[in-house]
Image: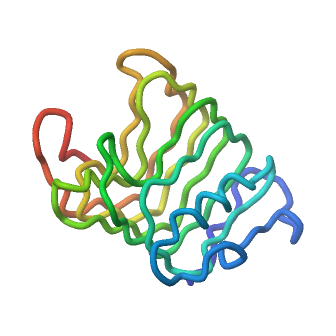
Amino acid sequence: PADPPAGGGGEAVTTGNLKFLSAWANGSGDQTAAVQSAIDALLPGNILIYDVAVTHGNVRIGNKSRIKIWGSSVALNGSGVNGLGYELFGTCDDVELSGFTITGDGTTTGMHKGFWSNSGNTLTNIKIHHNTIQQVVNGISCNSNLSGVCRDWDIYDNKIYDAIGIGPGYGYG
């Protein structure tokens, strides 16, 4: 995998803070449960580094603060009624998602997304950068139209290719 992005928060990166996805996932077959377990295990100050390419369904990043996830190659599989990708939910603050290449199935059936949220969450200080997202219905979506808060998001240097529209509210980057 590519070198992880340089830390930007000023905190020291120590070996104890680094977690490697290969401790949970072997990169073969559907790795949804393994990836979810790795994310669930993150504590404030932890950095999860994807050191294997994985295929998985929806994974949820919820109620986390001061974490970084540095990705690699991800192929999405399966389908979800609300969506499938990396879902931010609950109360999240100071979460960084960087270095992913996320590939959906190129159809509207699976509702594949890159990074997304529904209304009703409190999502602050979210950084999504240096990712490539392709063949999805949504690339990056922050939603608080009914309730919740999306505040102080930094979304930059991402590339979104081949977003697929299926109706109002879909098919945008």
Q: Residue 140, relative to residue 27: is it above or below? A: above
Residue 73: x percent and y percent? 45, 75
Closer-to-camera residue (99/58): 58
Residue 23: x percent and y percent? 72, 76
Residue 22: x percent and y percent? 67, 79
Residue 89: x percent and y percent? 54, 35
Quadrant assignment for the N terminus: bottom right
Residue displayed at 60% across by 58% down: 36
122 left or right of 107 in image? right
Residue displayed at 79% across by 68% down: 18
Structure colour scheme: rainbow
Residue displayed at 50% across by 84% down: 28
Q: Residue 88, relative to residue 68: is it above or below? A: above
Q: Number of numbered discs present?
A: 0
Closer-to-camera residue (167/96): 167
16 left or right of 103 in image? right
Residue displayed at 72% across by 40% down: 65
Q: Residue 13, relative to residue 87: is it above or below? A: below
129 left or right of 39 in image? left
The quadrant holding residue 164 is bottom left
Q: Residue 10, relative to residue 78: is it above or below? A: above
